[in-house]
Image (cartoon, rainbow, N blue to C red):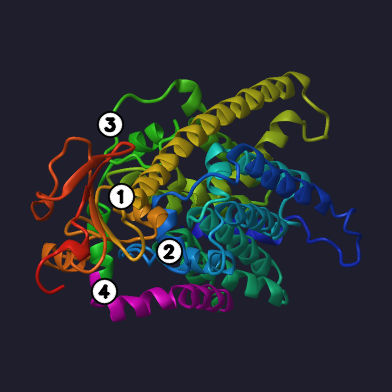
Amino acid sequence: MAHGTKAMLVGIRRGEPAPVPGTSWRTRGEWLLAAVAGAFTLAQLVLVRPGLGLGWDETVYVSQVGTQAPAAFFSAPRARGVSLLVAPIASWSTSTELLRVYLALLSGLGLYLALRVWRGLFPTRVLAVGGALFASLWITLFYGPQAMPNYWVAVGALVGIGCFLRARADRTDRAALWGIAAGAALMAWMRPTDAVWVTLPLLVLVVAARRWRLGVALLGGLVAGAAEWVIEAYVGYGGLGRRLSDASDIQGGLGWNFAVDDQLRSLAGRALCRPCAGALPNPAVMAWWFVLPLLAAVGLVVAVRARRTAPTLLPLACATTAAVPYLFMIGYAAPRFLQPAYALLAIPVADALFRLVATPGGRWRPAVASLLAVGLAGHLAVQYAVLDRTVDRTTADRRDWARNAAELHRLGVSPPCLLTGRESIPVGYYTGCSSAATGGPNANSTPADILRTARRQPTATLTRPGAAPPSYARDWETHRSAGLDLHIAPAPDRRDGPG
């Protein structure tokens, strides 16, 4: 460990010098980073399309601050960061298109700022290619304009680790200290537990190198970002330990779970692989996932030989700890979980690609360059194909939710109203209704409470087609809709007796 720490410190001291103040914007090559971020934003708007309806988790986050429906149940693992991120739009507008455009622009800006932090640690061309590699993944393009936390954990990780390296190399760089705090706060604001996993190598390095100023900035950011989540744990979840325990239970119980194969299955475009069964996708879909760590290892070897170890080793170490819980500690998978790891791997991988295609003297290797060009072209084609299928399938699913909402309105279920049962959270959002559950991770009610509500306002229970409704809804009228049976409670004004 001591040897590894020394290698990091030597690498930082001998890293590429920071840009000289006063050099022009274009000379520093920032236009390359801006171009990558702009292309990323444009690709989201064209390929994912602003008209894509809100997903299940998105309706939970947006409903906390939005006006379309009452706030959905907020389970223990969730944090309020995404809700606050979308509040500038969702607090006054129900337009999904406007929210998507806002998030696409914001995600492009976030990518630009995150890459800009790394200037001087790597050549600008490496940063631009690294940013393009991360931004061109179907996972990044798909989730960039969505109200979800993982992309923003990735941005926070890039900012925090880049600023950590800069502050370690230059004790007078106060802006870098603030950047460490900002990156850590952003991660903790979005997903506190992810923030801890990402920053573990930084905390170890702080202790080993006794750089307490860096530790204060890092811990200050984590505390600032997680403060609301911790306070809410005591106010609404029975304490921090109880909230962590509930979060673990909701995720199936944290512990040893080999989920690598689950992550591989999710690469085919499965937004949530739970339960995660079935055959693995086509090898062409999975190939990049195995090439990525190999190229990262090449990048590390190159960095060690060039005596600039830290700017490569530290993001690789943080990428590893960020991935550990999602590869080995939960029993299901979602491709977005590994976005922070992909973002941190992208820059060392880009550095490795440049070292492979050019000699130490700067001369290009035509054969290697051609081979890499073909490989990258195939990789981009696969990413586009998976993205296109995923967008089409997701659009169809969310249109079904909208059709169910329209049918519920036709049957007299309109706000204020209550939905329970299958997919009641997203369909409830589309309908403008509250949602309730008597069991599972979103349990927040009882059959007696639901029946009392049904006496006062329109209420419906949703089930799979042909499935029996819960006992409290056995005598409710059933209607078939888009992939669901709608069991509608008798209208409140038709009831006998007191309401």
Describe residue 17's horizontal placement relative to residue 43 as left or right: right
Measure how far apart labels 3 and 4 are at the Cα level.
33 Å
Whether residue 348 can be seen here: no
List the residue tagged with mark 2: 63
Upstream in the sequence, badge 3 or badge 4? Answer: 4
Measure how far apart labels 2 and 3 are at the Cα level.
31 Å
Whether residue 226 can be seen here: yes
User: Is disc 4 in contact with disc 1, using a CB cutoff of under 8 Å?
Assistant: no
**Mark 2 neighbour class, 10 Å CA radius: few under 14, some 14 to 19, many 20 or more:** many
**Residue under the point 30% across and 53% down:** 424
Measure how far apart labels 4 and 1 are at the Cα level.
37 Å
Q: Amino acid at mark 3?
A: Ala
Q: Amino acid at mark 4?
A: Tyr
Question: Which SS class for mark 4?
Answer: loop
User: Is disc 1 in contact with disc 2, using a CB cutoff of under 8 Å?
Assistant: no
Closer to the camera in the image, 52 or 299: 52
> Which SS does the magenta portion mostly show?
helix
Upstream in the sequence, badge 1 or badge 3? Answer: 3
Q: Position of residue 377 (x, y in %)?
A: 66, 25
Upstream in the sequence, badge 4 or badge 1? Answer: 4
Marks 4, 1: nearer the viewer: 1
List the residue tagged with mark 4: 237
Measure how far apart labels 1 and 3 are at the Cα level.
37 Å
Q: Position of residue 217 (x, y in %)?
A: 56, 76
**Mark 3 neighbour class, 10 Å CA radius: few under 14, some 14 to 19, many 20 or more:** few
List the residue tagged with mark 3: 277
